[in-house]
Amino acid sequence: MSTEQTSSQSPPAEGKPIIEIIGMHKWFDDFHVLKDINLEVRPKEKIVVCGPSGSGKSTVIRCINRLEEHQRGQIIVNGTELTRDLKNIERVRTEVGMVFQHFNLFPHLTILDNLTVGPIWVRKMPKKEAEELAMHYLEIVKIPEQAQKYPGQVSGGQQQRVAIARSLCMKPKIMLFDEPTSALDPEMIKEVLDVMVDLAREGMTMIVVTHEMGFAKEVADRVIFMDYGEIVEENEPFEFFDNPQHDRTKLFLSQIL
Amino acid sequence: MAETTQIEEIKPPVTDVGVIGWLRQHLFNGLFNSIATILILGFLIKLIPQFIQWAFIDSVWFTSGQECHQAAGACWSVITQNIRFTIFGYFPYEHQWRPLVAMIILVGMLVYSREWNRWNKRLGYAWIFALLVMGLLMKGGLFGLVPVESTKWSGLPLTLLLSFFGILASYPLGVVLALGRQSQMPIIKSLCVVYIEMIRGVPLITMLFMSSVMFPLFLPEGVTIDKVLRAQAAIILFTAAYIAEVVRGGLQAMDRGQYEAAESLGLNYFQMMRMIILPQALKIVIPPTVGILISAFKDTSLVVIIALYDILNTTKSILSEPEWTGFSTEAYIFIAMIYYVCCFSMSKYSRRIEKQLEYKHTPNQE
């Protein structure tokens, strides 16, 4: 990725927080995976979360759309607090898009059907309208010609772009990316990151778990470093990379850069 | 000189291709296989002519039982002379065209439905209509058709009826039980577990006995439930428990990511199951499911023990007549052929649907 472009090109964050995480703890059985997480994300903000494997970074974003349940503290997304209440969970999920490491496309549906299943069944959109919407987003991720194929017939990079388009079809206010490029061959990483950079420029609110530091420098408003289930350090990208404060951050950066 | 020395196309050694190659590869590739081949060949040479002699040359086809006893070969007359009773049993003789038409409709509908892309709403309505017609033909009582008690339903129509509805109803019930067993809600989950384990713990015969002997004892005085219906219910409840476990296997084989992707789109539980999870899980388990359905088909012959006359039982009652005693080999060969045709068709049918549902893959890039 070109790093000459700076984050100033994407619109600045604005207004009240759209995501608030207050004193959140989570355990897997006895194992304390997340310890006192506090995080505020404002609309249009782009946040990159990094850290060594097992640090709990994926778990944090999975808590934001309740794929994981937190045990203490509060998570408020777009004014809705996540509790056991199924209605709330479903409401939050329609506002939050998620992109997975392994794409998780539906292999029995064509690419077009992968994109329309959400709008048709959750948004109750007529089929024709949903298909137009799907084609619109397939053009944005630059693969409209693959619409009638099945996920198994296209490359990994294309699958991940389909997955991004599938989330966008729900017109989410927030997009979560869980290591979107880690399962890709090197030559396919760029095509996915390009789509994500474009999305950032459009002013999408994004939380991205990634080790792509070039991407972090290019689009992130803030970089969050996690280790052992804690937020260790949080800073603007250039400050974060050039002048890390914490020893653990320094160690981590020395290992990946 | 150079242009004259064309390299000749050489044929592969005669021992590697053609008939000899095939024989070498499939029948004589090693000492053990060669011996086995020779032994089996010897066995067949001894057996086949004898069988042909018995089944075709010395056999009699359209005679009375008395003449049969004098013949040296097979007595196929036991089938030809009693075909209508074997197939239709106690259904009133002059109305036996009705179950015949019903069976033809059933087979026709099944054959038409073999293409997956024909499965739509209209076909659904056609099936409902066809089932109503079949029911009317069997039961009568309308449009001038003489009513026929269900106790008179017997033979092949009864076998097909019990199997068809047994399969039709137990499949969705099994899916629901499998989903229930996976449920987060403890009451539903334990109900399903208890049901499945209890049913799988008893033989079908027990279930049939309970439905025909014990169950009526619990009904209030004067209330009776049709015997065929009770047997049908027992078969459905029994098969469903087995289907449930197979479907559970399919659900567990699903990648967690499929659930997560569906949930993160905001699909609710039923939408997720219907659109994303079940289509994939049920497809995975088509082969074992068909295994269960085929054995359910064959198990319908157990209704013998509650005195329903399915095709096996009608055959037995012919063989118990003095005129036809001793010809059970011929009669059972015939019944075996009917069962074989049905089971083999089921297996072919499912392979076909499985093929049509196969989604396209290129090798994964991981």
Image: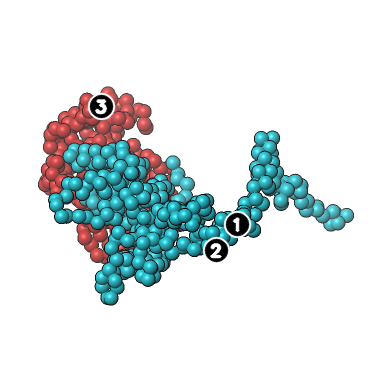
Tag nearer the camera, 3 or 1: 1
Mark 1 residue crowding within 10 angstroms, few (<14) / some (14–19) / many (20+): few
- Residue at horizontal 38 percent and vertical 68 percent from the top: B93
B248 left or right of A232? right
Residue B147 in the image, given as x and y percentages of width and height? 27, 68
- Residue at horizontal 39 percent and vertical 41 percent from the top: A183
Chain identity of mark 2: B
In the rendered image, which residue does mark 1 sit on? B71
B239 left or right of B319? left
In which quadrant is the N terminus of chain B drawn? bottom right
- CB under 8 Å between callouts 2 and 1? yes
Q: Secondary structure at mark 3?
A: loop
- CB under 8 Å between callouts 3 and 1? no
Q: Is disc 1 on the same chain as disc 2?
A: yes
Chain in cyan on the image:
B
Residue A108 in the image, given as x and y percentages of width and height? 37, 53
Residue A196 in sight from this viewpoint: no
- Residue at horizontal 33 percent and vertical 37 percent from the top: A211
Residue A70 in sight from this viewpoint: yes
Q: Residue furthest bottom?
A: B144
Q: Is disc 1 on the same chain as disc 3?
A: no
In the rendered image, which residue does mark 2 sit on? B63
In which quadrant is the C terminus of chain B drawn? top left
Above or below, B314 against B35 in this view is below
**Residue type for callout 1:** Ala
In the rendered image, which residue does mark 3 sit on? A228
